[in-house]
Amino acid sequence: MENQLDAASSQLGPQIIESWSRVRGRLRDEVGEVEYRTWLRQMTLAGVEGDEAVVVLPSRFLRDWVRDQYGDRLRALWQAEHQGIRRIDIRVSPETRPAAFAAAAPPQDAAREPAAEPVAAPAAAPAASAPVVAAPERARPAESRAEPSPALDPRFTFDTFVVGKPNEFAHACARRVAERPASPGFNPLFLYGGVGLGKTHLMHAIAWTIRESDPSRTVSYMSAEKFMYRFIAALRSQSTMEFKESLRSVDVLMIDDLQFLIGKDNTQEEFFHTFNALVDAGKQIVVSSDKPPSDLAGIEDRLRTRLGCGMVADIHATTYELRLSILESKAAGAGVAVPSKVLEFLAHRITSNVRELEGALNRLIAHANLFGRSITLEGAQEVLHDILRAHDRRVTIEEIQKRVAEHYHIRLTDMSSARRARNVARPRQVAMYLAKQLTARSLPEIGRRFGNRDHTTVMHAVSRVAELMQQDSAFAEDVELLRRMLET
């Protein structure tokens, strides 16, 4: 290494070497150690041609960044050192890095930075006065491009995504991005919604569709947490440039659960620069979070603004109809016959998120397979007692009226109306019966909630429903289903 230093110093000239060392040292002091290591450490002085100093870097991306961000300052520092040098030419030349870098590094670099990997020096280095020609730019080899994400779940495709009112807009946006990445107005695509509503499913579906339609496209999917850990690991191993270039080489970057970056300023800044580089290059970005960009407190304003400049699509909480459709789809996919009453019961009782809903169904199916039992309402309540208990709540008369009206397809106002038609009177009696069974309200109070009816009317309704349940098993099953969906 010492021989290389001596050879390079004599060829570039001692004054030029000393000037370059001071330029680098002053630049390091100005920008700070972290920024210097990230962007400027790999600068190499290749030579001087007339009034122009030639600086080379090992990649096109790094060349462009240094030229845009530090070019003017490099020229000013050079002019302060050498009035004869008025221009800086920043080029790409991977082959010249090791020997020239060693020659040009200031004395303090040797103590602060690890030595460059030993590589054979060029056969003949140019004299200081001779023109220096950088090696021609070459496309990055395939190995340097980020590999397609191995984290994609084969179950999460558009074919297995159940569409309903709460998610139809997000689904349509995801389809558009999958079929036409980086379309105007859809880059970035920002998906947001509560836990377990299908954001990750849609992101995986986008990735699968893009990879299947065009295998040459590189898709990288990762959680925001993994993005942060990879960034920290790159800082520790002093390989931040490899990390940056691996991300900037992809065609589609997908970051899940962006809210994890709240309060992590350095990682946010790195993501911001990656975001800008990809969007400016016409590459697609897909991001998910639990809140819209405007509500992400703790995210820098400039990043929040950029995230909201494309398409923002929300996924609402599931409706009963969507939950039931999801359960029917999952049961059919598992090849298991689950009674419709059980599916309706689960769709009514487990409303928090789809993951818990699917987990409950999977547990029922596994229990039935392990013990060779058929799936029933009673069995579901026993097997899922812990999940159901977590979803228990105090039932009100108003909720009973609403649920019964929906079940029998009548208007809510019919519960307190004077109508006596059987298709109205029977559901009203069922609601009174359930109010007596599931609440602590007195008969007179229940009567008042049903159009100021007398307590004897409530007593008659309760006894009549109990009698019909003894006589008609189908009717009894209906009432029992309603009770299980409402019980505390």
Image (tube, helix red, strand yellow):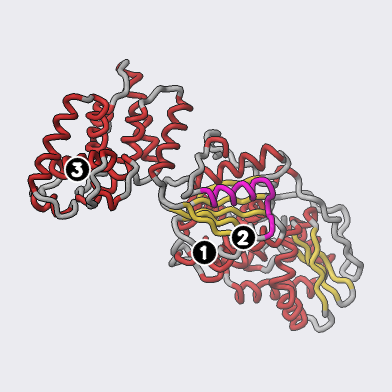
> Would you call the spot at circle 1 few (<14 residues within 10 Å), some (14-19), or many (20 or more)?
few
Residue under the image location 80 percent in, 53 percent down: 95
Residue 211 in view (yes/no): yes
SS at badge 3? loop
The single residue placed furthest to the top in the displayed view is 372
Q: Is residue 171 magenta?
A: yes
The single residue placed furthest to the right in the displayed view is 130
What is the C-alpha distance between the residues marked 2 and 1?
A: 14 Å
> Would you call the spot at circle 2 few (<14 residues within 10 Å), some (14-19), or many (20 or more)?
many
x and y percent of residue 1 in the render? Answer: 72, 55
State which region is magenta: 168-184
Position of the C terminus by quadrant:
top left
Q: Reading the chain from its start, which is encountered first: label 3 or label 1?
A: 1
Q: Reading the chain from its start, which is encountered first: label 3 or label 2?
A: 2
Read off the residue under disc 1: 266
Question: Which three-letter amino acid code belongs to the residue tagged 2?
Answer: Phe
Callout in the foreground (2, 1): 2
What is the C-alpha distance between the residues marked 3 and 1?
A: 48 Å
Callout in the foreground (3, 1): 3
Read off the residue under disc 3: 488
x and y percent of residue 188 in the render? Answer: 61, 58
Residue under the image location 74 percent in, 83 percent down: 80
Read off the residue under disc 2: 275
x and y percent of residue 28 in the render? Answer: 62, 72
x and y percent of residue 220 in the render? Answer: 61, 46
